[in-house]
């Protein structure tokens, strides 16, 4: 992608620089981030790339190579969470993500009032649960941080990007996606404590182990702004309140049976069981990776899928078919990943088995009459960075 050249053609002058930020896939720990728990994502090689130039007149111009729409022109000092809704590009519209970051930076007291010209292009699949929106947010935040010399550390940029999605776009996501995009490193998974945002880079060199982690994009679109995500978040908060803790992270795994016995609402009980057990699964995976036993994480992934399917109930026929078919075809383990209701699954395989497992999944989808999924390896890649 010649994003800089496209910027020059679009705006009539060269950008000040080019930045990129990746999408992510989550290895383990789902819906645990807003419960101040543990997650373990890794960055993908797929990125959002932004050519950006700083302005001095307070104008924000936004354009995407991936959307058939003219340049959106806004004023920084007029940005509010309702700005783009009024112009028909609010919740769900791509421009809300970079505009929301500018708003969140300004609202936090950072000097970005001069504005910017931004041209974006992305290879992160949209609607696949791979954080295409977080990539747009983080690449915008990093570019403005550099151009305006704000000096904000990566975790703070991630929090700004999260606030843009929560308060401006209207999706109550946790901070995992933005932290993964901002802070991941090549060859590692990111162990993130969502309470204090402390991170640890966990070596995850699959090729050296003769393994591959496949991403299977079911091509079933999901929308986290449709209420299902918010309902589960509210349910988790209700469970925490009933148990007398600030967040479900504070319920120890050993105390889970007694905690569940105190919950009378069957739905809330399911949500609590998933969150507490998935936090435990993150700890299990870390312990296994720390001793180099990568293959042993396979059953933990599959167990996590069962919890997401049965307790959180955010899977779908296509995701369940990926997991069951892959495991029956020789995969080491598999689970859905991301927000659910569609999107993607991950499959851990021995490298020589990747082709046959992929073939089995494609055949199963064809037999079921589903749209053929997109399958590609997840290579743990670098986080956001300036590239030109």
Image (cartoon, rainbow, N blue to C red):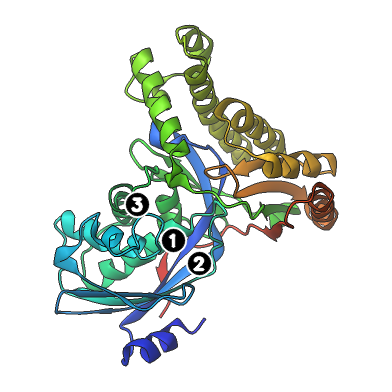
Q: Quadrant of residue 93?
A: bottom left
Q: Is residue 237 visible?
A: yes
Query: Between marks 3 and 2, how big is the CA–CA gap?
Result: 18 Å
Query: Between marks 3 and 1, how big is the CA–CA gap?
Result: 11 Å
Identify the residue position indicated by label 3 in the image: 165
Above or below residue 67? Residue 101 is above
Q: Is residue 111 visible?
A: no
Q: Quadrant of the C terminus?
A: bottom left
Residue 192 image offset from top left, x and y in percent: 44, 42
Residue 101 image offset from top left, x and y in percent: 29, 60
Q: Nearer the viewer, mark 3 or mark 1?
A: 3
Q: Which label's residue is closer to the chain start, 3 or 2? A: 2
Query: Between marks 1 and 2, how big is the CA–CA gap?
Result: 7 Å
Does residue 201 appear to the left or right of 152 in the view shown?
A: right
- In what element is the residue under mark 1? helix
Q: Are marks 3 and 1 in contact (CB under 8 Å)?
A: no
Q: Quadrant of residue 314?
A: top right
Identify the residue position indicated by label 1 in the image: 135
Question: Which residue is nearer to you in this view: 19 or 209?
Answer: 19
Above or below residue 385? Residue 134 is above
- In what element is the residue under mark 2? strand
Mark 1 crowd level (few <14, some 14–19, many ≥20, 10 Å Cα): many
Q: Which label's residue is closer to the chain start, 3 or 1? A: 1
Residue 120 image offset from top left, x and y in percent: 41, 74
What's the residue at 43%, 86% (across, down)?
A: 6
Identify the residue position indicated by label 2 in the image: 47
Q: Are marks 3 and 2 in contact (CB under 8 Å)?
A: no
What's the residue at 60%, 36% (across, down)?
A: 285
């Amino acid at each position: 992608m010649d994003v800089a050249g496209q910027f020059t053609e679009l705006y009539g002058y060269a950008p000040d620089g080019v930045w990129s930020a990746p999408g992510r896939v989550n290895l383990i720990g789902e819906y645990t981030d807003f419960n101040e728990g543990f997650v373990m994502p890794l960055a993908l090689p797929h990125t959002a790339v932004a050519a950006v130039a700083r302005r001095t007149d307070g104008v924000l111009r936004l354009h995407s190579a991936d959307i058939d729409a003219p340049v959106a022109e806004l004023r920084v000092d007029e940005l509010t969470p309702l700005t783009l809704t009024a112009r028909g590009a609010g919740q769900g519209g791509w421009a809300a993500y970079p505009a929301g970051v500018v708003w969140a930076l300004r609202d936090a007291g950072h000097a970005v009032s001069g504005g910017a010209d931004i041209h974006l292009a992305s290879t992160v699949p949209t609607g696949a649960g791979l954080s295409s929106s977080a990539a747009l947010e983080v690449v915008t935040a990093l570019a403005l941080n550099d151009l305006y010399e704000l000096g904000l550390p990566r975790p703070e940029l991630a929090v700004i990007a999260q606030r843009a999605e929560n308060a401006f776009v209207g999706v109550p996501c946790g901070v995992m996606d933005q932290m993964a995009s901002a802070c991941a490193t090549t060859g590692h998974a990111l162990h993130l404590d969502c309470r204090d945002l402390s991170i640890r880079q966990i070596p995850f060199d699959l090729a050296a182990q003769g393994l591959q982690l496949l991403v299977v994009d079911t091509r079933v679109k999901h929308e986290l702004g449709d209420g299902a995500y918010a309902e589960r978040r509210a349910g988790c908060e209700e469970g925490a309140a009933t148990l007398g803790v600030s967040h479900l992270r504070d319920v120890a795994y050993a105390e889970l049976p007694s905690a569940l016995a105190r919950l009378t609402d069957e739905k809330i009980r399911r949500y609590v069981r998933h969150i507490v057990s998935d936090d435990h699964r993150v700890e299990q995976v870390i312990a296994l990776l720390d001793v180099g036993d990568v293959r042993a994480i396979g059953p933990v992934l599959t167990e996590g899928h069962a919890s997401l399917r049965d307790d959180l109930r955010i899977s779908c026929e296509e995701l369940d078919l990926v997991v069951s078919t892959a495991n029956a075809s020789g995969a080491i383990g598999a689970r859905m990943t991301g927000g659910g209701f569609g999107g993607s699954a991950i499959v851990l395989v021995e490298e020589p088995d990747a082709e046959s497992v992929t073939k089995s999944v494609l055949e199963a989808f064809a037999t079921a009459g589903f749209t053929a999924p997109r399958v590609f390896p997840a290579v743990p890649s670098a986080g956001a960075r300036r590239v030109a």
